[in-house]
Amino acid sequence: MNMVFVLVLLSLVLVGFAVWSLIWAINKNQFDDLDSPAYSILDDDNEPFMHKKTEALAEKTTDDTEQKD
């Protein structure tokens, strides 16, 4: 019988934590805009991302082709 009281108390604590988490998320505006993050992956960036080594290699190859002409 003591185990039933422990389990009921534990379940009430878990439900209380779930309700508190939901209220916190609503107050922090976590549910305001659910669609924009999903579509942002489809948008292209304005500038392509290149590492510094790749940029240096691209400049080197452009310099080599300009010297041949």
Image (spheres, rainbow, N blue to C red):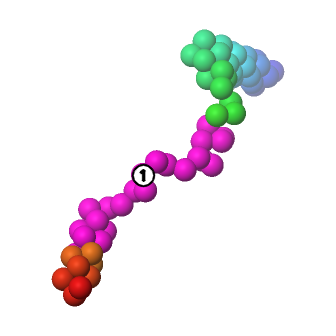
- Find residue 56 and report its horizontal and vertical position in percent: 23, 68
Can the viewer see residue 54 in this picture? yes
**Residue under label 1:** 47
Mark 1 neighbour density, 10 Å: few (under 14) some (14–19) many (20 or more): few
**Magenta residues, as a range?**
37-60
54 lies above or below 66: above
Relative image position of residue 66 (x, y in whole percent): 23, 79
Between residues 29 and 23, which one lies in front from this camera angle? 29
Spot the residue most to the bottom.
68
Say if 51 sits above or below 66 in the image: above
Residue type beneath disc 1: Glu
Residue sitting at the far left: 67
Specify whether residue 34 is painted magenta. Answer: no
Q: Is residue 55 magenta?
A: yes
Local secondary structure at mark 1: loop
Q: Position of residue 21 (x, y in %)?
A: 63, 20
